[in-house]
Amino acid sequence: MIRKAKINRFSINPQITYQVSIRWYVCFIISLIIFVGCQTTKISRIPYKKVYSKYINNMAILYSAENPEMDVNIRTDDQFLSSLVAGPAIIPQLLMQLAYHSAKKDDIRTFNDMIFDLNIGEVLCEKLNTKFQLCSYFHVVPQESITKNKVVWKLLEKKVKDLKDYKKIGAELNVDTILEINVLSYGLKDPGIFSDPYATLKVDVKMTTAFEGKVLWRDIIEAKTAIGMDTIDFVDIVYGDVQYLKEEMEKVADIFSEKCIERLGFDTNYTYLLDEDYMKRMKNNVNIAEKLNELNVMRHEDLITNADYDETKINLIEKARKRKSVRANIENEQNVTEKQ
């Protein structure tokens, strides 16, 4: 009798085994979904040495011809509340997860349809182009000259380029250095009820010599900007005016370009002249970004010499700095007067 009791005590109930196996299977599926969504490509980072700048005379900034899809994840609060309602039961939790991923895909499709005419790679290149003109002493090829070149544009479709590709790009654009940007991810995220949504951007940046194929610098740069309002209010504004969404993407792209300049060790003092508030206050003055790009196009088309371009650029920057300092002094005097 004692031996029989022991056997019954340690015997396995088939129903319990079935429930445990179901739970393990569900956990495995959820873990697999999370793993697939979180895996990233390993990229070896190469630090930039300032001595390289001595050998850079002409540079082209390139982006992939394929426009990446914007990621949208703004349903964290909904997921949290749904999980509380579903309770600890595994099957309802799994159904909630599936519903959450389905709603997320709908958001991604909707927001990407709204900004179909925005190419994030093109925006990044334009901002980097202007900032390099402000900060560096080497010349940068105008972006419109790159997009018009059919040979170069065809090569931009290749994600992995070899030495022949770099040589061909260098010969076509007459440059010795190529800066490539590859957008790994960008979009909108909402951490939940304890924080506001924000725009995020993650980019793989690589600088290569055109005729040797040597990688001078490679890094992953991340940037984000807080939107500063509730998700519901933000979504309502976006659906009413899609331009607001594009402006948020422009802001995070601007922060990325600033970080890129800083990683290369250039003086970022000049880039702050492109501040939006400053440009709005200087409505009657010259728009530095537009003027620099016009001068760069003229230089690239041999309408002005490199020396004339450099001299005009320096005069333009110094003029803008004086105006900004004068404006700052006036604002300081007004603040002191108001306090008195």
Image (cartoon, helix red, strand yellow):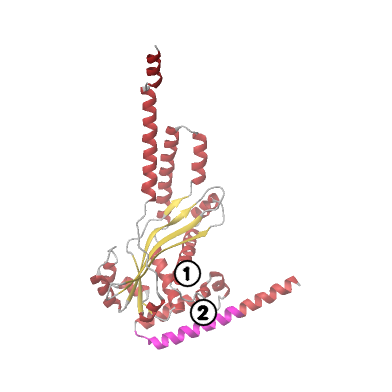
In the image, the segment drawn in magenta is 302-325
> Considering only vertical position in the picture, is 177 above or below 30?
below
Q: Quadrant of the C terminus?
A: bottom right
Percent from the top left, x then y, of residue 148? Answer: 31, 72
* Number of residues whose C-alpha sits closer than 10 Å to that of mark 1, classed few (under 14), some (14–19) or many (20 or more): some
- Asked whether residue 57 is in view, the answer is no
Q: Amino acid at mark 2?
A: Val
Q: Can you identify the residue that label 2 sits on? A: 286
26 or 333, nearer to the observer = 26
Q: Secondary structure at mark 1?
A: helix
Percent from the top left, x then y, of residue 152? Answer: 28, 71
138 or 306, nearer to the observer = 138
Q: Could you tell me which residue is drawn at 35 percent across and 80 percent down?
A: 55
The reply, left or right, for residue 299 in relation to residue 333 is left
Q: Could you tell me which residue is drawn at 36 percent across and 35 percent down?
A: 25
240 or 329, nearer to the observer = 329
Disc nearest the viewer among 2 and 1: 1
Q: Can you identify the residue that label 1 sits on? A: 258
> Considering only vertical position in the picture, is 325 above or below 37?
below
Q: Determine the CA span between mark 2 and mark 1.
A: 22 Å
The reply, left or right, for residue 273 in relation to residue 64 is right
> Considering only vertical position in the picture, is 129 above or below 119?
below
Q: Could you tell me which residue is drawn at 37 percent across and 39 percent down?
A: 28
Q: Could you tell me which residue is drawn at 50 percent across and 55 percent down?
A: 238
